[in-house]
Structure formats: C-alpha cells, structure tokens
Image: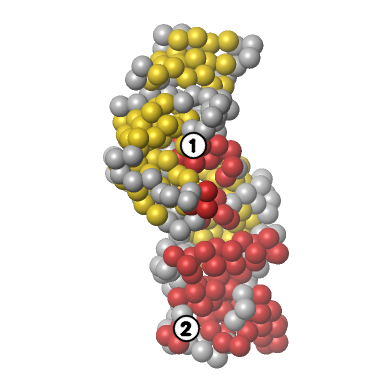
Amino acid sequence: MVIELKNIVKRFGQNTVVNHVDLTIGDGEFFTLLGPSGCGKTTLLRMIAGFNDPDEGDILFGGESILHLPAHKRDTGMVFQNYALFPHLSVEENVAYGLRARGIKGQEVKDRVKEILESVQLGDLASRYPRQLSGGQQQRVALARALVIRPRVLLCDEPLSNLDAKLRVSMREEIRRIQQNLGITTVYVTHDQEEAMAVSDRIAIFYAGHLQQVASPADIYFTPANRFTAEFMGSCNILETECVAFDAASETAKAVSNGVEFTFRAKDAEVGQSLPIMLRPDWIELAGDGSVNRFPGVVRERMFLGDSIVYQVEALGRTLRVDTASVNHGRMLEPGDAVELSFAFESPVTVRK
C-alpha cells in the first residue's frame, strides 16, 4: 500500500506541530519517522491512523483520500507504546479481539490467531494472561493483535521504548523479520537513532515540525542534509573551517581550522567563506606514518566500552570525540597523553546550517 502525505499541517492552538509535510511511502516499505521528543512525528502517525485530523493537506492510501474515513475503517493495525492489552483476556483472546470486532467468527478466528501467534513465536502461550508475560512477550502480543486483522498498513508508535536495552535489540529484529515476511507497509515512530537505522528502508528526520531529510539510513548517516541531521543521527564532530582554495573540477577544498590547513573532498565551497565539516568519531584516526590531514591533540578523557575505546581529545581549540577499536591497542592512551590525529581526504562531509 502506497501512502501519500500532501502538504500536511497540524496546529494545536498557536503551535504548529506539523508544518507543510510532503511524503510518499512505498508499497511494502518499512518507513521510520525519527526525531526528538515534541518534533511532530507521533502527531503525524496519529493523523495517518485517523486519531487526529490535519488542518491542511490530504492523506492518500493507494491514490485515494482517507480523510473522510474514521480510524476503524482505514484498515490499519496499530502497535502502541504501552501495548494496551486487555488484562482480563488471555493472549489468544487479546489477539482475536480485532477479528471478532469485524464480525469474523468460528474456525476462521481460531485459524488466523493460531497462524499469527506462531509467526511471533507465542504459540505455546495462547492461554496465558498479560500479567504472566514478560515485556517482550507482551510486545509480541500487541504486534500479533495488530497484524491478525491483515491490515493494509502497520503503524508503530515507539513500541520498544518500555523494554530494556538488550530486549529492544532482539525485538526490533523480530519486528523487521515479520514485516519483511508479510511485505506490509509499515510506518514506525521512534526517537532512537540506532533502532531507526537497524530496521528502516528509509528514514524521515523531523525537527520542530519540519521535515529535515528523507533517505536511506546509510545516506542520512554518511551524507546528512544539514547540521541538525548530522548531530542528531549519531555522534559527530563539527569543525568550523574557512575555505582558502577550491578546485571545482577535482572537487577539492583547502580549508583552515585554528591555524591548521586541511585538504578534503567538497562538492561546493567559496574561498573566504565558512566551511563547516562533519567527522564521525571513527573517521578520525591516531595518525601513522604518511597520514594526511594531521594535527596534534591532548587526551582529556577515556572511556573503555569493550569493543571500542572513546577518547575525548583537546585539539583545534575544541574537544573532539575519537572512537578506536580496542583490538588495535596494546596500551590505551591515558589522560594527558599527547597524540597526533588525522583524517582521510574522503572523510569529511560539508554541512550547512
């Protein structure tokens, strides 16, 4: 099912929480709305579901407007943040509720409930009640209840936020597996960047009601559209540089930061103008012989994370985060150690405001 959002605006009083948003979500796509709290992503999801109406614009399913349809007639399945399970009903009864509400009876209900419970690996727990289930099991019941009605669209409102970190990882993999098996168009809301990158075909970044960028997880991570997206989508260092030379033919820029000159790839630059560049922490290396774009620094803090080491390094008049693989270091650097850092010609990404 293709979903189209056309010039969507939503206001609460004087506050515009969704500001002229245009989106097209492909058939069978896992599409994530990502942004900080209060950015408008959940409001947008609720408008797709039919819980809120837009003040301007239109929402189309398969090329047809659905604004005239109430929520229960839009053929969507919804997974809520708090799961919203009926405590007095068993797992089987919770999952069957939506089917019975649609007038489906008898053996078809039993067959469809059994099928979906097997797909979420809860077939042996059909007779249990929500209070007898773990958080992850309750989440899968909520997912099964949304899917058993065979909706055209699956909507998920931060469904993993109540789970512990390890369980979130396993459950996001489960949701993605089920979604791919069923091929159902899915709109997923989260504020967790890693979660969004792990499950999504494409991500829409929101901030203050405005759409910032729509792209694949890799494109957003490696080529963010602006500074907000760069800083929100994972850890990053932003270096303020001034362009001193630019060759458009080779897409090569020379720029100075705190008295140090760097050479790197850039598609557009203007001599004498500010040229902010983004460097992810793992793009900065402990300099070796022959390294380009070298500059000195002093380690101020160190954090050992098992598979990696995070250093906070004072350099270029600011503090930079540098991530290194722990397997490569016989001795960890100590606070106060002088270091030489570098980054590759291809590494930096120029970012706009």
Question: What residue is shown at x 44% (from left), y 32% (from top)?
Answer: 341
Q: Which residue is mark 1?
A: 285
- Name which of mark 2 and mark 1 comes first in the sequence: 2
Q: Amino acid at mark 2?
A: Leu
Q: Is residue 249 above or below residue 85?
A: above
x 61%, y 53%: residue:
30
In what element is the residue under mark 1? strand
Q: Amino acid at mark 1?
A: Glu
Is label 2 in contact with label 1 (beta carbons under 8 Å)?
Answer: no
Which residue lies at the image location 51% right of the left edge and 60% below the top edge?
156
Q: Position of residue 272 (x, y in %)?
A: 41, 8
In the rendered structure, find residue 318 and report the number of the disc placed on it.
none
* Callout 1 crowding tier (Cα within 10 Å): few <14, some 14–19, many ≥20: some
Tell me the CA gap for discs 2 and 1: 47 Å
**What x and y, as percent, mark residue 301?**
31, 45
Q: Which residue is mark 2?
A: 133
Q: x and y percent of residue 236 in the render?
A: 43, 38
Helix, strand or loop at mark 2 = loop
Q: Residue at x 70, y 64 (%)?
A: 181
Residue 338 shown left or right of residue 193 in the figure: left
Q: Is residue 145 left or right of residue 116?
A: left
**Residue 282 at least partly seen:** yes
Query: Where residue 53 appears, x then y in whole percent?
Result: 45, 50
Q: How many marks?
A: 2
